[in-house]
Amino acid sequence: MKAAPFTKDELGRLMTLADLNVDCSNIQESFRDLAKLAAKVSGSPISMINLVDSYTTWTISNYGFDVDKTPRDESICQYTIHENEFYQVSDLSVDPMFKDEGFVTDGPKFRFYFGVPLSAQNHNLGALCVLDKKAKELPAEKIELLKIIADEIMNRLKTMQYVESLQNKVTEVRQTQNRVIHDIRGPIAGIIGLADIMKMQGRDNNIEEVLEFIGLIYKGGKSVLELADEILGEEKRLKNKVKRDDMLLQTFKQRLEQLYTPQARSKNIQLAVNVLNAGEDISFPQNKLMQIAGNLISNAIKFTPKWGDVVATLDVVQTETNNTLYITVRDTGAGISAEQIAALLSYNTASSDGTDGEKGYGFGLALVKHLLKGLNGTLNITSKLNEGTIFEVTITESK
């Protein structure tokens, strides 16, 4: 299959998709009803809800055909995201672009494809598609119903994002309340204690002691207000902080291995993911990390020749004030020149092909750079031609 060109604003499209913060591997059930409805409405045995990123078409839910991801350049949905209305192939077996593909000649032997773009902020992020093993065309009324289902899919994704944002805000408010309660309990107890002394002594209090106690109560009350203001002010400064999920590095390692080992094995490349420090009590923003590390690993596999090695290393360093996460991806590829590194990190990157002919979209590293900006992280690239490349990500968070 000829790879579709990237969209006119591919980087903007990828950033919009990244900002949805979708955990593609964990929301199957949330969309199962819509996937089934699409199949029934279209009279097709198979339907998929797909999101298309730099290298991969992720199936976030499906009906009638079990799949979780497909290389972008092997997915028909890469063409659907270029359309405003829909993309339909009545008979894949006679279409010059698809007739020789494995999913047509072997395996499922698909004949029919229909896809509706999933759109947000003027970008097509993926597709709701239905497939059949017999050739056909959908009538106009069924097409309109599928468009309605596609709109509902995007509404649900946006709602999930909004609910997650509200949950984060609720958590922040509760944390603020707990901090205020904890930090001002002592000073308030001291103020109450002074008032109790004055009450117990009653008329035995002399004017000097009363004035002294009143002065202490005033200063204590003022300090409590200043402390509360300081805490609340700090929380306001942190209100735009990226959500953190409780994902340990061992879990992170396992998910990376599950997702990217198949891609490596398809090129006879050895992929290893190592953890230097498990950081048992530290959590980091799970979904953004999966996108960052996933893009780097996919990029490394793409530019590493057969029988090569790609090694990802995860590490956490703790200090009294900070937690720092290090992600290193090292490959044994052809290497990248300084000029190429500068171009890859720009927003106007040209496409290039991998060592096994994989289509490059040129936006993987630019997207990583964008995601790291939101996390106050850094990306460093070192490379030697004919020896390989090292990608180093650093994310530091204050305690």
Image (cartoon, rainbow, N blue to C red):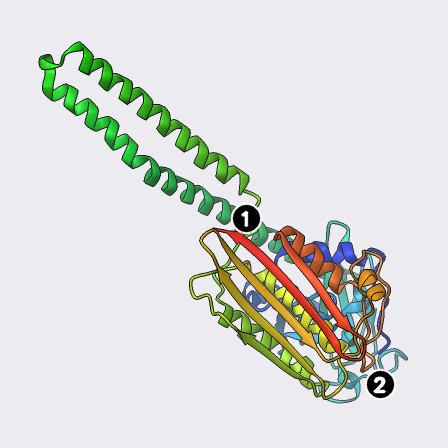
In the image, farthest residue toward the top = 207
In the rendered image, residue 186, in percent from the top left (x then y), is placed at: 28, 36
In the rendered image, residue 250, in percent from the top left (x then y), is placed at: 49, 72
Amino acid under label 2?
Answer: Asp
Crowdedness near tag 1: few (<14), some (14–19) or many (≥20) residues, C-alpha within 10 Å: some
Report if residue 28 is visible in the image: yes
Looking at the image, residue 204 sits to the left or right of residue 371; the answer is left
Looking at the image, residue 204 sits to the left or right of residue 288; the answer is left
- Element class at badge 1: helix
When the figure is inspected, residue 91 is found, relative to residue 193, above or below; the finding is below
In the rendered image, residue 101, in percent from the top left (x then y), is placed at: 81, 83
* Residue at x 52%, y 55% (from the top left corner): 244
The residue to which callout 2 is attached is 100
In the rendered image, residue 300, in percent from the top left (x then y), is placed at: 72, 74
The residue to which callout 1 is attached is 165
* Residue at x 22%, y 27% (from the top left corner): 192
**Label at residue 85:** none
Where, quadrant-wise, is the N terminus in this rendering?
A: bottom right
When the figure is inspected, residue 90 is found, relative to residue 143, above or below; the finding is below
